[in-house]
Amino acid sequence: MRPVVSYIRVSTGKQGKSGLGVEAQREAIARFAAAESLELLTEFVEVESGKGSDALDRRPRLAEVLAKAKRAKAPVLVAKLCRLSRDVAFISGLMAQRVPFIVTELGADADPFMLHIYAALAEKERALISDRARAALAQKKVAGHSSGESDQPRAAAGKGRCDKPESSETRSRPMFCPSSNKFRRLD
């Protein structure tokens, strides 16, 4: 059996606490290892964003897995390329430094050209995720929510509160409230 070191990563603390993303990756890695007759030496799990080419500075477990894999002369096994990184330069750097890694989704024989293509797609997806999150937060702000708040609209209560609009036509539109310096939906 060929030895491998597995690396599992989720991006947020919420994903880490739920364990769902970790378990899904663990299962994909275990199935692939069994099908390919690979021996899992060690598993490393990390909760950290995958963006940026400075991944080794921000992700200590990734640095550990790369060091362990080098010592064991074993490739790093990940469920999806984006779990390793969503940065083309980082993936490209690993390939240039001849750091062996296997992506279960792509198979043990994925060629460098295809890995570059998938890395570019992962980087693009990261940008799209960021754009969607920014747009959703802006939409919530217009609707009267601030970042980190629940989905429940704020009550316009307290000092200098904004009164409800008079007409039903304006009731469902966001309204600027000077006392709080924010837009609110006052239904």
Image: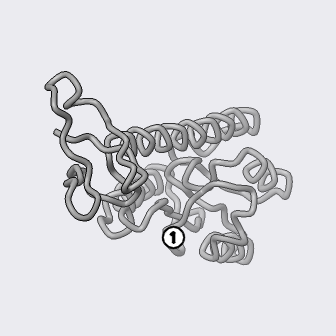
**Residue 84, image x, y percentages:** 61, 56
- Residue at (74%, 72%) from the top-left corner? 70
**Crowding near the residue tagged with mark 1, few <14, some 14–19, many ≥20 C-alpha atoms within 10 Å:** some
Question: Image quadrant of residue 69?
Answer: bottom right
Taking the image as shown, residue 91 lies to the left or right of residue 79, namely: right
Front position in the image: 166 or 109: 166
Residue that numbered label 1 is attached to? 46
Residue at (39% x, 50% y) in the render: 178
Image quarter hosting the C terminus:
top left
Residue 108, how many percent across, how many down? 60, 45
Q: Residue furthest top?
A: 169
Measured along the vertical axis of the image, is residue 165 above or below residue 170? below
- What residue is at 78 percent from the left and 48 percent from the top? 89
Give the vertical position of 54 relative to 28 (above or below).
below
| Relative horizontal placement of residue 50, taking residue 105 as reference (left or right) | right
Residue 125 percent across, percent down from the top left: 56, 37
Q: Is residue 130 above or below residue 63?
A: above
Q: Amino acid at mark 1?
A: Glu
